[in-house]
């Protein structure tokens, strides 16, 4: 048996080394000192309690989004529309905040309502992509991309139109909510909310359990691997595709709601912050397996936060994190491809 | 070319697929390879043709040791293989498929290649048009195309893994004539089959595998009894013919007209009774698959109605039919019937009624073990379906059937099964009939149709015969009807009756 564990681990370590090597070349080409850059990246992510808590703050939406994407990937769909679903989730939850702002309702209930509204918005937006696919025959990638643009446009229109700050509309978004409606954080300076972390952890656990031990999860897998056979086995395939879209949108909407309720306390133009696309990378990197999604998402969040320092210290663009993340995904996908080919040879 | 395999070994976990096989095939001969399902035939053939690597063992061609590590290596050494399950054919023209993979083809030019293609096809009397599309070919024609391609690539050893399942009788005769001729011209041919009569007719020698080992070789005149005993380690008695037809009807087909891809059928009416077996005979693509699918709600009739136990089901979805106890088993096992990547246990869970939210893993595993034992599947509950041998995938498909069922619709129920399993599977199906289930099946094997059906419906180019009692038919008459002959006689008989 040549397909033993060490072999697979070796391949993965090799992939990471290769990604680092490539990034190093990029750095050298940009005439930047690679070691200093990596050191700064590490310090930027782990150097103080403050940055560590920032890493966790960005881990929350990333993990939520990844959880949802695991479901759509399992059923064989590319939910590129995830960005739009985050945005619409954020819009819905802002809407709920604005409606209930002066209603005298207990703040806890208002926040809960905002979360539910966010989930609803994300789910509806996702089901739109799903409906385009199932009833309109529009590939979910194109449909999703289109809906992303629409969501962004809608968001900007609200910020600069109906929901604009009294007097001047601005890129800094809508009027911040009253602090009583902010999701409680560890301390007043921090944006890290234990509740948000709890929600994200719960989300990935739910998805893990769903894929591992429920009829729903198994049926999703069957549809993803062979829709025709799944249909003949009695699984209503398009309903399952819709359900996975709806659930994924629900998680994305929740991520949008978290951004609104605990990070920005208002709606801003770039509310999705690219977490959707990053989530797609994480999901691909973990090969659609829920078990290792949480640590990998954490690593990506750390790279993101760590790179914020780079422009200040080394006059490097913070997109270095993106370069590293992107190459890592590509190299790991390549390694997986190579591995499948090797195994096929072995007749496994 | 003389081929010699020396001590070939290949294990999959605990399974010894090939446990040290040594075999010598002389030039200019046809070597039959026999063995029960899962005996290791395909594995050995795939090793010889470079699709999988052996754990150990050597291959000699004309006495020279060769290293075969890929299909390209193997064809370079003159070895070509036709696979058990014809691989996916992309929609391209015959000539493009033909050129594909030929190192010299680009320099040669398409027109010249087409000329050579025509010349080769003519030599073997294959009616293949270079400009036709591959996906419009029947299984038998794809096989012919593949043979031409391999010959053109310079194959001097030809491996055929169960080439006669799924092709029509005339195609089979043509194939055999071709093989005999190629052998006479000096090629060595390895012919894997479960059909003893084919091996007896065609082969100059036969080797029998059992559980990964070579257990015997035989030369003509072959003795069927001895071969069967070598294959299974025991005698296999044929089952008695027995009918279980009851009065009550299960499926009523009334004045149904259907439109398939290239075929139209008009005004078909008949009834399947409880416990009855109806065989659908016809060359591939004569309409029987379309028809069977329509009986399962997979396509809608243009006119007419389908009723299950007098309940009108016309236009309802396949899942509604399923709820009424109709089961449909497609011919393409891995494409339509099973889900590659999922384990046997997971398949059983999917096929059974859904209970609650969570899967009871222990119960599922127990169910899987029971069924594996009951259907004699060589595999473990956690094996993935694609790791099963062809015959075992077929058993898996049948093991997934729920009970009770009112109607089983099945395409090629025993394609790729060895004799013992064929008898076994039919005993299982007949037991369903005894419980009152009706069965409608398609088969390319006329003997199977005559042996197991109560009535037979013949399809030819959209013409559909009324159900004919199997007792009124024999292989010759049925063969003629399938080929489009004797229909006037049949129609006048019907008119008189
Ligand atoms: N990829 C694989 N992984 C695990 N086991 C395998 C794999 N391929 C084959 N096997 C096992 O090896 C054994 C031999 O399989 P093989 O396909 O050679 O049988 P076969 O003689 O061709 O049978 P059949 O007549 O059913 O086609 C079987 O027990 C099968 O389950
Ligand atoms: Mg085989």
Image (cartoon, helix red, strand yellow):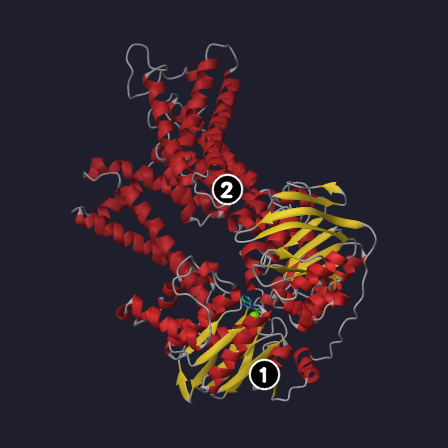
Q: x, y (%) of residue B453? A: 73, 63
Query: Which sits in the foreground, B176 or B357?
Result: B176
Chain on which label 1 sits: B
Above or below B461: residue B191 = below
Q: Which residue is drawn at 68% across and 45% down?
A: B321
Query: Which quadrant is home to the N terminus of chain B?
Result: bottom left
Q: x, y (%) of residue A14? A: 35, 58
Q: Does the residue labelled 1 lie within 8 Å of ligand 1?
A: no
Q: x, y (%) of residue A95? A: 44, 18
Query: Which sits in the foreground, B315 or A346?
Result: B315
Asked whether residue B198 is in view, the answer is yes
Query: Which quadrant is home to the C terminus of chain B?
Result: bottom right
Mark 2 element type:
helix
Task: Determine the quadrant in which ligand 1 lies.
Answer: bottom right
Asked whether residue B366 is in view, the answer is no
Q: Residue reaching furthest right?
A: B247
Residue labelled with disc 2: A71
Q: Residue at x 50, y 10 (%)?
A: A103
Mark 1 element type:
strand
Of badges 2 and 1, nearer the viewer stands 1
Q: Give the number of the disc on residue B207.
A: 1
Query: Which sits in the foreground, B474 or A112?
Result: B474
Query: Which sits in the foreground, B316 or A26?
Result: B316
Disc 1 crowd rating (10 Å Cα; few below 14, some 14-19, many 20+) is: many
Q: x, y (%) of residue A119? A: 49, 28
């Amino acid at each position: 048996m040549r397909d033993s564990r060490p072999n697979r681990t070796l391949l993965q370590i090799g992939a990471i080394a290769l990604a680092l090597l490539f990034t190093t070349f990029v750095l050298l080409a940009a005439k930047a000192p690679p070691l200093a850059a990596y050191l700064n990246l590490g310090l930027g992510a782990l150097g103080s309690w403050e940055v560590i808590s920032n890493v966790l703050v960005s881990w929350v939406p990333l993990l939520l989004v990844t959880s949802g994407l695991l479901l759509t990937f399992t059923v064989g769909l590319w939910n590129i529309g995830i960005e739009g679903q985050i945005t619409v989730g954020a819009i819905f939850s802002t809407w709920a905040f604005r409606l209930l702002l002066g209603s005298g309702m207990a703040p806890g209930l208002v926040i809960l309502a905002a979360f539910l509204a966010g989930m609803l918005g994300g789910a509806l937006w996702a089901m739109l992509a799903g409906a385009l696919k199932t009833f309109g025959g529009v590939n979910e990638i194109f449909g999703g991309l289109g809906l992303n643009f629409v969501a962004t446009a809608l968001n900007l229109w609200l910020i600069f139109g109906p929901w604009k700050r009294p007097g001047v509309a601005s890129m800094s978004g809508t009027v911040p909510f009253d602090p009583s409606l902010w999701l409680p954080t560890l301390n007043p300076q921090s944006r890290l909310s234990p509740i948000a972390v709890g929600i994200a952890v719960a989300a990935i656990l739910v998805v893990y359990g769903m894929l591992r031990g429920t009829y729903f999860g198994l049926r999703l897998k069957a549809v993803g691997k062979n829709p025709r056979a799944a249909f003949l086995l009695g699984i209503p395939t398009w309903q399952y595709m819709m359900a996975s879209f709806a659930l994924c949108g629900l998680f994305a909407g929740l991520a949008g709601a978290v951004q609104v309720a605990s990070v920005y306390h208002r709606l801003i133009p770039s509310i999705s912050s690219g977490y959707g696309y990053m989530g797609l990378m994480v999901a691909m990197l973990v090969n659609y397996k829920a078990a290792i999604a949480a640590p990998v998402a954490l690593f990506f969040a750390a790279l993101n936060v760590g790179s914020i320092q780079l422009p200040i210290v080394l006059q490097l663009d913070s997109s270095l994190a993106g370069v590293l993340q992107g190459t890592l995904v590509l190299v790991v996908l390549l390694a997986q491809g190579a591995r499948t080919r090797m195994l096929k040879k072995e007749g496994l | 070319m003389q081929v010699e395999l020396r001590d070939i070994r290949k294990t999959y976990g605990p399974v010894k697929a090939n446990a040290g096989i040594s075999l010598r095939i002389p030039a200019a001969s046809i070597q039959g390879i026999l063995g029960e399902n899962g005996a290791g035939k395909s594995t050995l053939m795939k090793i010889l043709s470079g699709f999988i690597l052996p754990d150990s063992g050597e291959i000699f061609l004309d006495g020279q040791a060769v290293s075969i590590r890929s299909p390209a290596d193997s064809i370079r050494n003159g070895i070509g293989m036709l696979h058990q399950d014809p691989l996916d054919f992309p929609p391209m023209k015959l000539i493009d498929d033909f050129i594909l993979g030929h190192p010299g083809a680009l320099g040669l030019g398409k027109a010249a290649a087409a000329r050579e293609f025509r010349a080769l096809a003519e030599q073997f009397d294959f009616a293949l048009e270079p400009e036709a599309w591959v996906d419009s070919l029947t299984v038998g024609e794809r096989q012919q195309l593949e043979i031409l391609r391999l010959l053109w690539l310079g194959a001097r050893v030809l491996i055929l893994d169960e080439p006669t399942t799924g092709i029509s009788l005339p195609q089979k005769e043509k194939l055999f004539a071709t093989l005999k001729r190629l052998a006479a011209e000096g090629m060595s041919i390895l012919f894997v089959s479960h059909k003893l009569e084919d091996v007896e007719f065609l082969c100059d020698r036969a080797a029998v595998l059992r559980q990964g080992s070579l257990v015997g070789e035989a030369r003509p005149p072959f003795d069927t009894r001895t071969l069967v005993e070598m294959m299974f380690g025991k005698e296999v008695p044929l089952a008695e013919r027995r009918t279980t037809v009851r009065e009550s009807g299960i499926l009523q087909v009334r004045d149904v007209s259907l439109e398939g891809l290239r075929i139209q059928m008009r005004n078909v009416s008949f009834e399947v009774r409880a416990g009855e077996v109806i065989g659908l005979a016809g060359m591939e693509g004569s309409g029987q698959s379309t028809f069977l699918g329509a009986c399962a709600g997979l396509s809608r009739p243009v006119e007419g109605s389908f009723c299950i136990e007098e309940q009108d089901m016309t236009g309802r979805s396949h899942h509604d039919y399923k709820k009424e106890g109709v089961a449909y088993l497609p011919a393409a096992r891995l494409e339509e019937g099973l889900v590659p990547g999922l384990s046997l246990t997971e398949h059983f869970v999917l096929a059974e009624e859904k209970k609650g939210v969570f899967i009871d893993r222990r119960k599922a595993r127990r169910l899987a073990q029971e069924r594996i034992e009951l259907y004699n599947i060589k595999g473990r509950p956690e094996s993935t379906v694609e790791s099963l041998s062809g015959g075992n995938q077929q058993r898996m498909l049948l093991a997934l059937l729920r009970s009770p069922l009112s109607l089983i619709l099945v395409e090629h129920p025993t394609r790729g099964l060895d004799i013992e399993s064929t008898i076994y599977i039919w005993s299982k199906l007949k037991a369903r009939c005894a419980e009152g289930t009706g069965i409608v099946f398609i088969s390319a094997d006329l003997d199977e149709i005559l042996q197991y059906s109560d009535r037979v419906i013949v399809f030819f180019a959209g013409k559909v015969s009324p159900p004919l009692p199997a007792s009124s038919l024999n292989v010759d008459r049925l063969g003629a009807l399938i080929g489009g002959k004797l229909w006037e006689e049949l129609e006048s008989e019907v008119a008189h009756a």
